[in-house]
Structure formats: C-alpha cells, structure tokens
Amino acid sequence: MCALLVLAIAILVGCDQRSRPATTGTPSVNVTPAPAPAVYPRTVTDASKQALTLEAQPKRIVSMSPGATETLFAIGAGPRVIAVDQFSDFPVEGTRALTRVDYSRPSPEQVIALRPDLVLMSGRQRDQVQRFRDLGVPVMYLGEPATLDGVFEHVLLIASATGDDDRAVTVVRALRERVEAVRTRIADVTTGPRVFYELSPSLFTAGPNSFIGSVITTLKGQNVATTTTPFPQLSNEALIAADPEVILLADAGAAKVESSAVGARPGWAGISAVRNGRVYPLDDNIASRPGPRIVDALEAIARVLYPDRFR
C-alpha cells in the first residue's frame, strides 16, 4: 500500500548568527508544486479494451476488488470511495464503515441505487461486466494482472480514471525502487530454491503466469507449478515428485493450515521443505491481492527464501 499530495514547503534554515552577519529581507524557500488539477472530460481504455468516457472526476466510486480498493486509497482517491466488496478490508479505518456489495455476484440494483460515477470490476466479475454496462453503469474492468509489472500498470490505469495520475506515478516509482532493492540483494543468485505456493489444502497453487507467480520468478525461485494456467491444482503425487525446498502456506489464515501439520499429509514427510523445516505461513491478505502491498509480499517471501540476505 495515503493521502493526497499536499503543498510541501521547505524553509531554508538561517546561518549561525555568530559565524555570519545577519541578513535582511524575505528568506528563500523551495516550493514543491501541487499536483496539477485533473483534466476532464477524459476517455480511458480498460483491460477489456472498452473505452469509458468520464465527464468529470469521479466522486462516488464503487470498488469490487480488494486490490483495487487498496490502490484507490494508496493514490489518494479513498475519500471518494462509497462502497466496496465484502473482502475489501484495507486500510481498516478507511473501509470499515463503507457500504458492502457482493464480490462474486454483485447486485446491479444495489449498485445503481448508490448512484456511482465509477465502478471498478475485477476478474471475478468478468461475466457480469456487460450486464452492468447495459444498465448504464460506468464500469472500468481491471481483469487479473499476470505479472508484478501488471499490478503496477493497474495502479496507473485506475488513476487514469480517478484523476490521481501524479500520485499514482509517485506510488509506482516507490514500489519499483523497493523491487529493485530486493533484486540487488540477490543479483548474484543464479538459481533460487524450488517453491510451492499453497492457496488451499486441495493443492491449488499460483502458476508462473500469475502476479503471485511473477513474485516468485522475480526472486529467482523455481515454481514447482509449471503449467500455463494461472492458478492450477496439483496432484499429491506431482507435488511430492517436485520436492519443493520451500513451502509457502497462503492458506494459513483462511483455512487455518498449520506449518507443523503439513508433514502429516500422506507422503509429505520426505519432502525437502518439510524435512528441513522450511514450511512458512504467509499473510494472504497482502500476497493474494493485486495492489500496492504486493511488494510487501515480495519482501516477506524474499526473507523466507534468502534468510541470510534479508534480516
């Protein structure tokens, strides 16, 4: 994962009066200009290649994606969010009192009654987007980013609709700098450990063609899921044969999977990660959402994969 950029004034400190003569006149100041006002009307093209024309800056925004919700608050559009899906819970103070809409099957009637001037829909609502558009709802479809860079592009895309372009550029620049700092620490690593990222006890995982898989790739980890499907399900036999050296339990919270219990699964006692005690719970609240906190997840996973380099 904020407030709108404010006018920042840095007043130069006067020189020591004992070492320099006193000066007169107005002290010099360095002023950082405020962001330029967003210009409307503007037309933006979303992930479905659909153009959306906004006559004015959106003041009543509905977000149906936890990642989009976090992004809105990060770029300074939080005060204009009037409703979110039931899984959007960050930032806590900003989202706690907001109206809730269903994540999987949002009601068009409920959304229309909210009188939104911008509705953000994600991959989960893909099949319902056209229905909302046919009813005159101003929808921006975000899809599901397949890479870490795709998450950053989503930040900029959302800002292009909300008019918070300058703030979004600043946010993305800071996120990219953090990613580069991690890359620098592992620059000499040729091949990282084999990694299994568990989304559920039924062995659904994140493949390389997903934003979570992209995080593992960025860290030079070898994802044991090699299919082109973003979120495939592995068989128990395939997982054991892949012999991951690190297991990340993104289901430790929702499914309450405990690291100590993983070794009791049939055939898992011999898996390298289990034998060497490298099974780790992961906060899926940051890792499973395509928003600014995905870099928090990158840093957390980096500490697990390379404990000697990240302390």
Image (cartoon, rainbow, N blue to C red):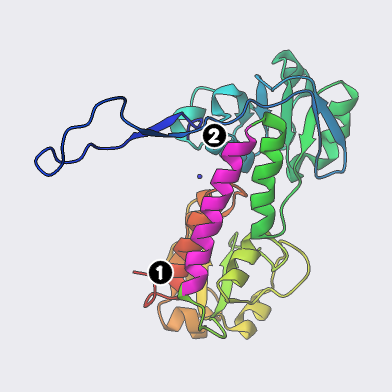
Q: Is residue 197 left or right of residue 122?
A: left
- Amino acid at dot 1: Ser
Q: Is residue 146 visible?
A: yes
Quadrant in the picture for residue 118? top right
Residue kind at label 2, given as amino acid type: Phe
143, 104: nearer the viewer: 143
Q: Where is residue 237 drawn, in percent x and y? A: 66, 80
Q: Nearer the viewer, residue 252 or 63?
A: 63
- Please rate how many residues cluster around mark 2, counting C-alpha atoms within 10 Å: few if below 14, some from 14 to 19, many from 20: many
Question: Which of the two discs, 2 and 1, sits closer to the camera?
Answer: 2
Q: Give percent across and percent down for residue 37.
A: 63, 25
Report x, y in % for residue 106.
73, 29
Which residue is at a point 62% across and 71% down the rendered structure image?
217
Q: Of 218 and 7, which appears nearest the observer?
A: 7
Residue at which label 1 appears = 260
The residue segment tinted magenta is 164-184
Reading the image, the residue beneath label 2 is: 73
Q: What residue lies at 43% left-to-right and 76% top-to-bottom?
A: 306
Measured in 3D between alpha carbons, the distance from the residue under mark 2 to the one under mark 1, in whole angstroms, is: 37 Å
Q: Secondary structure at mark 2?
A: helix
Asked whether residue 71 is in view, the answer is no
